[in-house]
Amino acid sequence: ASFQGDVLAPAARAWASLLARTGPFSGLAERAREMLTSWDATLRPDGGEGLLYAYFRRAITEAVLTPVIGNATCRWLMDEKSPGAGRVLAHWLSNIVYRLETTYATNDPSGRPWSEVLPGALELAWMDAAVQSGEDPSRWRWDERHGLASKHALSSAFPDLDGALDPPTAPAGGDADTLQAAAYGWSGKSDFVMTTLPVYRQVVDFAVPDHGSFVIPGGVSGLPGTAHYADQVEHWRTHTRVPMQYAQGNIEANAAHTLRLRPK
């Protein structure tokens, strides 16, 4: 079941390969290029490379697509006002990444050499990371900017509760291109708060279904403040699971309490 926590990003590996055969550049762009090309493309929670790559991913997407679709259209797609617009960008970017070794090996979709396009995106990514996490890249961590920050549906209606309705946050690795689904928005308005995530993980051996296990990024209670409202968040974050009681005998033996609903 460890593959559920796989945070290797093939897209990051493809960009690193392009960066390795392009350059060298100068200044911050070269520092960013060196950091990403010496990286294994694994978006670990404690890795600074993942943070730099995330800023680069946003910057290179805008740099590459603006000449093709225009600045106004690109900004509209990135501003997250339309929930589905981000998927359009993601699909376009995926098509470009898929062809970085072929169609777009030397030039971007608008025909510009990568040597002209990459430095600006790399420099911007480095500056953004430094502004948010400090000048020392050895102290950068992906999970300080990226993770789960769910909001209760009624939080905005009760601001005086100061987030008491919300489940706890959970820092995480990965991104939209890893097996551990952990997408984030394009605009940066919410930093890298996850917008897409696995809401149910389950492992079952059908030969012995009684030994199955599962986890959700919350809890089985819908009532904030109760014991089981968010008690699985840490299990979800660390890729552990809780027993999934299947047989009636196991259910009864492991029940903490029983609620009986009797019609009148």
Image: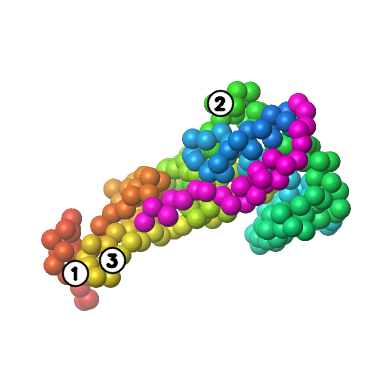
Q: Residue at x 58, y 38 (%)?
A: 39
Q: How far, Cα to Cα, is label 3 from label 2? A: 42 Å
Q: Residue 231 placed where, x, y %?
A: 32, 48
- Of marks 1 and 3, which one's residue comes earlier in the chain? 3
Q: Is residue 75 above or below residue 55?
A: below
Circle 1 or circle 3, nearest the eye: 3
Q: Is residue 262 left or right of residue 141?
A: left
Residue 119 percent across, percent down from the top left: 78, 36
Give, as a three-letter code, the residue at label 3. Asp
Instruction: Name which residue type carries label 1.
Output: Ala
Q: Are marks 3 and 2 in contact (CB under 8 Å)?
A: no
Left or right: 209 with respect to 232?
A: left
The residue wearing badge 2 is 138
Q: Is residue 193 left or right of residue 6?
A: right
Q: Which residues are magenta?
A: 1-27
Whether 3 is among the magenta residues is: yes
Label 1: state its secondary structure. loop
Image quadrant holding the C terminus, namely bottom left
Would you call the spot at circle 3 few (<14 residues within 10 Å), some (14-19), or many (20 or more)? few
- Does 35 sit above or below residue 87? above
**For the residue labelled by badge 2, is the local secondary structure a helix, a strand or a loop?**
helix
Which circle marks residue 247 in the picture? Answer: 1
